[in-house]
Image (cartoon, grey):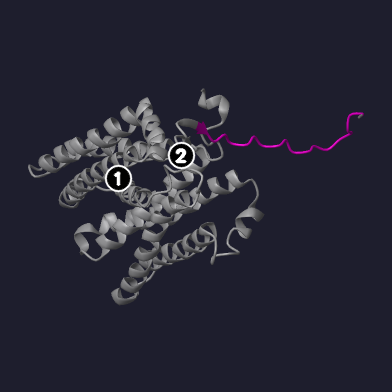
Amino acid sequence: MDPKVDGQIQTEWGWLVAIYLFLGGVGGGAYTIAAINGFMGEGLALSTRVGLWIGFPALLIGSLFLLADLGSPARAILAGMKPGSSWIARGFWIITVFMILALLHLALYLYTDIGGAVLAVIAGAGIVFAVLTMAYTGILLGASKGIPFWRTGVVPVVFVVSAVVTGHFTIMLGMTLFGEAAAMGSSLRTMALEAAVLVALEVLVIAFFLQAAFKLPDQRESAERILRRRSFVVGYFILGLAVPLVLMLVVYGSLAQDGAAISLPLVAVGALLGLVGGLILRQSVLVCGALPTLNIAGFQFRRVARPKQRKPSMGMLPPQ
């Protein structure tokens, strides 16, 4: 049975939602890394500044992609009306509060001499809402009860870890663009080691997610579909995880020998590949979400998505 014909694969959420999930993760991850590095002293000040510059704009741009998918700003406003019963409404308020905190933190950090205690309080609250934002991108999928592949507690964990990785890579890319190689050898070496550890953690989490999906009949078909996608295996696993991991380890070793100038291109390439991999991960999880196959008395039945009814258009109606 051709899934493109029988409608078994969901088609409601595509690239626009994938980009929103990706940018929301980048914003939350970059802010989290920046806020944590802010507690670690002047040695990582550049990463803090770059990360704060990334957090709010990334989430703002991602929200515009979500609005484009919704088709109307009014629908976005209505989305926040029932936080007691809707994860979409809860996410609306989580993201709103996080964007306010991220913008406030950026403004105070750049344009005031406010004390460290105040910034520490804002950073602590910002980290909480950044983590909630990253987790929400996975919880939103889990709230879609018709797709078993999404309805698991592992998906938010996958998205949080991937968001931190992509946010980290975005900061490293910004450092290569706006920093001086001779002045940031030590901080870039620390960031490279952090990136390698985070990527290794993501490998373990995504492997656990796919293994767990294979054990459940309703999720196995989606897991098989995602592993048959060349873009996922090559674009995400190899180019988005394996190559950046190797490059970050090479950068870590070369910076120990004062090879900052040589390491900058490697950092940029590794960071870009990691970011592309993060986007491919989200798009693949979305498009491989399949409706469950029901097994009744030895027969298999596939749930078929009901086709949308065409919207009425303005103009004269044809004769009956």
Earlier in the chain: of badge 1 and badge 2, it is 1
Q: Position of residue 161 (x, y in %)?
A: 31, 50
Q: Is residue 271 found inside the magenta-colored segment of the image?
A: no
Evaluate whether residue 58 shows in this view: no
Question: Dot 2: within a 10 Å radius of its alpha carbon, few (fewer than 14), some, or many (20 or more) residues?
Answer: many
Question: What kind of residue is marked 1?
Answer: Phe
User: For the residue labelled by badge 1, is the local secondary structure a helix, a strand or a loop?
Assistant: helix
Residue 78: image quadrant is bottom right
The residue lying toward the viewer, choosing from 56 and 88, is 88
User: For the residue labelled by badge 2, is the local secondary structure a helix, a strand or a loop?
Assistant: helix
Question: Dot 1: within a 10 Å radius of its alpha carbon, few (fewer than 14), some, or many (20 or more) residues?
Answer: many
Q: Which residues are magenta?
A: 301-319
Q: Is residue 304 found inside the magenta-colored segment of the image?
A: yes
Report the residue at 54% width, 45% height from top: 65
- For this orientation, the residue located farthest to the left is 257
Report the residue at 29% width, 31% height from top: 239
Which residue is label 2 attached to?
286
- For this orientation, the residue located farthest to the top is 2
**Magenta region's main secondary structure?**
loop
Residue 237: image quadrant is top left
Which residue is label 1 attached to?
169
Q: Give the number of the disc on residue 313.
A: none
Q: Position of residue 164 (x, y in %)?
A: 31, 51
